[in-house]
């Protein structure tokens, strides 16, 4: 895969359409023809879809490969990563089709709000309700490095 690193910044809200498609912000779109991987995950104890480009997926596989785990453990980790990731693509109109099961798992309602949250090397898709919780929790964020000042 070996694609160039893409940096994801910002927060964007879009409506999920009746066919479970969501528009992807232009800055978050991969190059035409490149696949993305939708990974079921939790972020701050809330269900999300992490959207990984090929470079980020490869980076995670490389972490496993370079680890001091046994080959059996590495096989399990690679398999678990592959199982959690669903290959997808963004169409010419900039829309990402998400399976009904994944949409339900993340808690996004049909024609409801989906938030795209930049997380540097990937972005997350979460429901409007979970985004509201995320924003409330920001008040408790510690900033001992002073990066938010």
Image (cartoon, rainbow, N blue to C red):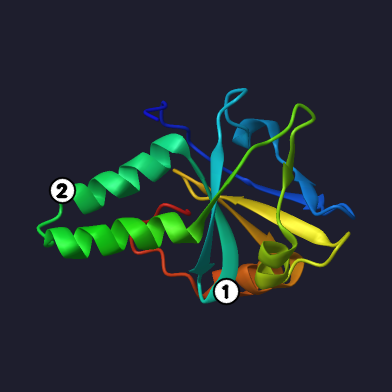
Secondary element under disc 1, as helix, strand or loop, is strand
Earlier in the chain: of badge 1 and badge 2, it is 1
Q: Residues within 10 Å of mark 1 (few under 14, many from 20)?
A: some
Secondary element under disc 2, as helix, strand or loop, is helix
- Circle 2 residue: 66
**Residue 46 badge:** 1
Q: On the picture, is 142 further left or further right than 40?
A: left
Q: On the picture, is 29 further left or further right than 63?
A: right
| Viewer-nearest residue: 141 or 114 | 114
Q: Residue at x 41, y 26 (%)?
A: 4
Q: Is residue 1 above or below residue 130?
A: above
Q: Residue at x 29, y 61 (%)?
A: 77
Res. 47 image quadrant: bottom right
| Viewer-nearest residue: 148 or 90 | 90
Quadrant of the drawing holding the N terminus: top left
Q: Position of residue 97 (x, y in %)?
A: 73, 47
């Amino acid at each position: 895969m070996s694609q160039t690193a893409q940096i994801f910044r910002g927060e964007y809200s879009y409506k999920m359409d009746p066919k479970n498609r969501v528009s992807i912000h232009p800055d978050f779109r991969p190059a035409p023809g490149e696949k993305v991987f939708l990974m079921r995950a939790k972020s701050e104890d809330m269900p999300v879809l992490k959207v990984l480009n090929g470079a980020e997926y490869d980076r995670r596989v490389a972490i496993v490969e370079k680890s001091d785990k046994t080959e059996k453990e590495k096989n399990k980790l690679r398999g678990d990563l592959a199982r959690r990731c669903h290959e997808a693509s963004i169409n010419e109109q900039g829309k990402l089709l998400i399976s009904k099961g994944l949409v339900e798992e993340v808690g996004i309602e049909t024609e409801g709000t989906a938030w795209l949250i930049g997380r540097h090397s990937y972005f997350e898709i979460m429901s409007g309700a979970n985004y509201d919780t995320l924003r409330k929790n920001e008040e408790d964020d510690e900033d001992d490095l002073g990066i938010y000042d």
